[in-house]
Structure formats: C-alpha cells, structure tokens
Amino acid sequence: MRHRFGILLCWLALLAGCATQPDWIKPDDHQVSLVFGYFDLHDAPTKLDDVSLKKYDGSPLYFDCGVKDGLFWHIGLPLGSYQVETFSGSGGLFTNPHRYDYGTRGRNETAVRIRTPDIYFLGAYRFVPVKHGMFEQDEFQMQPIDTPSEKELLQRLIALLSSDPHFQVYQWQIDLARRRLKELSR
C-alpha cells in the first residue's frame, strides 16, 4: 500500500511539473495574438487531434491549440518566440495513437516571433512519411502546401470562432482575422 501511495505522489509531482499551460485568456486582453496553421495528415497513420506550441523565451511554456479538420489555432499567445513542438492523433480502428515530435530538431518551418499583438499564419503543411529499413524507425517530413490557402483557412477560422459560443467572446481576435481576410481579398 505504501509503495502505491509513493508511486501516486511521484506521478502527481511529475504532472504538476509538466502543467505549464498558462492561465486562460481574457477576452478583453489586446496584448495577445491569434495564431493559426494547417496540417494535412492524410498520409499519416493517424488524424490530427492535438497541436502543441512551445514558447522559447525564458522558461519554456507549452500552449495547446484548438484543432478541427487539420486547421489549428490559438487565440491568445503573448509576445515571444514560438513553434509547433508536437502534434498527435488518436489513431483509428487498426492504428494506435501517435505523438509526432516536430520541434525537437531545432527551429522548424512553423517558427514565429511575435513582437506586436496581431494575427500570425504559421503555414500549411502536408505530412510525408519517410520509410527506412525494416528494423529502423520511420520518420516524417512536413512539406509546405499551397492548398488550402491562408485566405481559405481564415474563412474557416472566422466561421468557427464566430459560431462557437466559447469563442464568440474573443471579438478582438475575430476582428483581427476579419481584417487580415480583407487584406488578402484585395
């Protein structure tokens, strides 16, 4: 019994140490940025269920993104340097859940430095598996793609944020997205 309690305490301490998600974003905070991107995982063994951004300034913080049909976003990133660190999928009937380490090999294509509160597009990428020998671990590359475009993704993001009661309160971020959409429509 004592042994189990000790293991439980160790797990709780570990989880507390990993819990670096900052406090929830205040809807009237105009010092944060809206960030979004897109991952096409059609050639991956899983679909996209989770994207985690890592902040590199000072002590590392991790920010979980909203995800829907390959589109991912975060409505309240403070100033700093970020990039996608990991993304994951739950698998399916014949596949296991999988976590992909994207940012662990130095700076990647999604890296962005937020110097002023605004809207930032991290890009659109397609998962490309890289096969190795039978006894070697497979790898992947994220290849930039043109479709869907930033404009198409912004239209989807605006519709999603505007129709979801949990996100409707973030009017400043929705207005940032609408302003950027007008710039892209010129």
Image (spheres, helix red, strand yellow):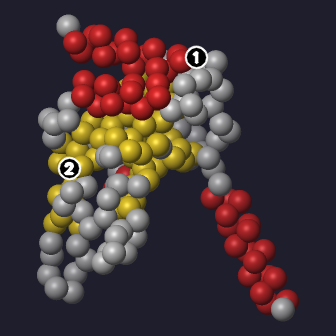
* Mark 1: few/some/many CA within 10 Å (<14, 14-19, 20+): few
Residue 28 coordinates in the image, percent (x, y) = 64, 18
Q: Quadrant of residue 95?
A: bottom left
Residue 33 coordinates in the image, percent (x, y) = 49, 25
Q: Amino acid at mark 1?
A: His
> Of 30 and 163, which appears nearest the observer?
163
Residue that carries the numbered disc 2 in the rendered image: 126
Q: Quadrant of residue 87?
A: bottom left
Q: Are marks 2 and 1 in contact (CB under 8 Å)?
A: no
Circle nearer the N terminus (2, 1) = 1
Q: Decide: is 186 above or below 49.
A: above
Q: How far apart in space, not on screen, are marks 2 and 1 (Cα)?
A: 32 Å
Residue 78 coordinates in the image, percent (x, y) = 55, 29
Which residue is situated farthest in the right direction here? 2
User: In terms of secondary structure, where does tag 2 sit?
Assistant: strand
Quadrant in which the C terminus appears? top left
Quadrant in which the N terminus appears? bottom right
Residue 79 coordinates in the image, percent (x, y) = 53, 27
Q: Which mark is residue 74?
A: none
Q: Decide: is 175 above or below 148.
A: above
Looking at the image, residue 132 sits to the left or right of residue 105; the answer is: left
Q: Decide: is 153 above or below 175.
A: below
Q: Quadrant of residue 61?
A: top right
Q: Decide: is 66 above or below 36.
A: below
> Which residue is drawn at the image coordinates 20% and 30% (left, top)?
149
> Which residue is drawn at the image coordinates 26% and 67% (left, top)?
45
Residue 113 visible somewhere in the drawing: no
> Which residue is drawn at the image coordinates 14% and 35% (left, top)?
146
Q: Amino acid at mark 2?
A: Arg
Residue 68 visible somewhere in the drawing: yes
Residue that carries the numbered disc 1 in the rendered image: 30
> Which residue is drawn at the image coordinates 31% and 64% (left, top)?
46
